[in-house]
Amino acid sequence: MFFAIPFPAIDPTLIEIGPFAIRWYALAYIAGIILGWRVARVLVQRTPKVATPEQVDDYVTWATLGIILGGRLGYVLFYRPGYYVTAPWEALALWHGGMSFHGGALGVIVATWLFARRNAIDWVAFADRIVCVVPIGLFFGRLANFINGELWGRVTDVPWAMVFPTGGPDPRHPSQLYQAFLEGIVLFSVLMWLARSEWVRARPGILSGTFLAGYGLARITGEFFRQPDAHLGFLFAGATMGQLLSLPMILIGGWLILRGRARHVEG
C-alpha cells in the first residue's frame, strides 16, 4: 500500500441558489477570458501596432463564441462521435460538460480570421498577440479539472500521488496540475518573454508558431501521465487522442516559425 495525499474535496459548484448555479469550471473560462482580454489590449499596442484596444474589446465576443462552439464541436467529433450519432440532441447539452481544446483552438482560429478580415487587420500578426494570453485560460481550465476531480492521471507510486473520488482506490498522478504548469505557466512565460522582443513582434507567425508547437509539446508530455479517456483508451502506437491531435500543431507551429523569420512588418 503506497502513501497517497488525500484529494482536497472541493465542491465543483461554488454557489447554488435554486436552479441557478455557479461552477468553478465556468469561472475558469470567465477568468481566462477577462484576464486574457486585459493583457491583449496592451500587447496589440506594442510596435508594430496591429490593432487598437477597442478592436480587442470587440474581438472578445468573437473569441468566446469560437471557444464554446469549437470546443463543443471538437469534443463531439474527436472524442464521442459514436455516442452523439445515436443521441445528437445531447451535443447541445453544454451543461453536461465535454469540451475539446483542439476543437476550441480551431474555433478561435476561424473567429480570428473572420474578425481580422472584417476589420482589415493582418490576421497572423493579430493572432500573434492573442496566442500570448491563451495559456492564462489553459491554466485556469486545468485547475478547474483538478477541482472537479476529473481527467486524473495514471496509477503511480510517487510521493505526491492522490486518490481521486472517481478514479478508484489506486493512487494516481495529479496530471491536471502538471498540465496547468506546462500548458499554463511555462507556455505563458515563454510567449511573454518572446513578445518583449520587437524583432519577434515584427515577424508575424513566430509567436503563433511558438504557441502551437509549445502547446503540442506540453500536451504530449502531460498525456504520458494522464489516464486516457475510458471509451478511447490508447490508440495508434500506444498514443492517446490528445497526443495524436497535438502532432499537427507541432508541425504547423514549426512551419509558422520558419515562415515568420523570413517576414518583416514595419512599425
Image (spheres, helix red, strand yellow):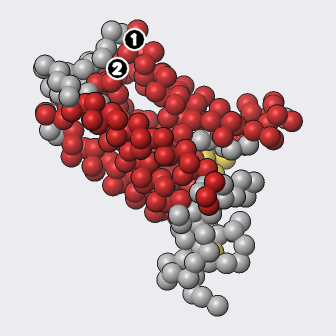
For mark 1, does the 10 Å Cα neighbourhood hold few (<14), some (14 to 19), or many (20 or more) residues?
few
Tally of marks? 2
* Snapshot quadrant of residue 1: bottom right
Q: Secondary structure at mark 1?
A: helix
Q: Which residue occupies the extreme bottom position in the image? A: 1
Q: Secondary structure at mark 2?
A: helix
Judged left or right of residue 84, residue 38 is left
Give the residue number, with chain letter if any, for mark 2.
123
Q: As shown in the figure, which amino acid type bears the numbered disc 2? A: Trp
Is residue 28 shown to the viewer in this render? no
- Asked if disc 1 and disc 2 are in contact, CB closer than 8 Å, the reply is yes
Q: Earlier in the sequence, mark 1 or mark 2?
A: 1
Q: Position of residue 154 (x, y in %)?
A: 60, 69
Q: Residue at x 14, y 38 (%)?
A: 197
Q: Residue at x 57, y 35 (%)?
A: 103
* Snapshot quadrant of residue 50: top left
Q: As shown in the figure, which amino acid type bears the numbered disc 1? A: Arg
Give the residue number, with chain letter if any, for mark 1.
117
Compared with 52, 149 (above or below) is: below
Closer-to-camera residue (14/138): 138
For mark 2, does the 10 Å Cα neighbourhood hold few (<14), some (14 to 19), or many (20 or more) residues?
many
Judged left or right of residue 158, residue 74 is right
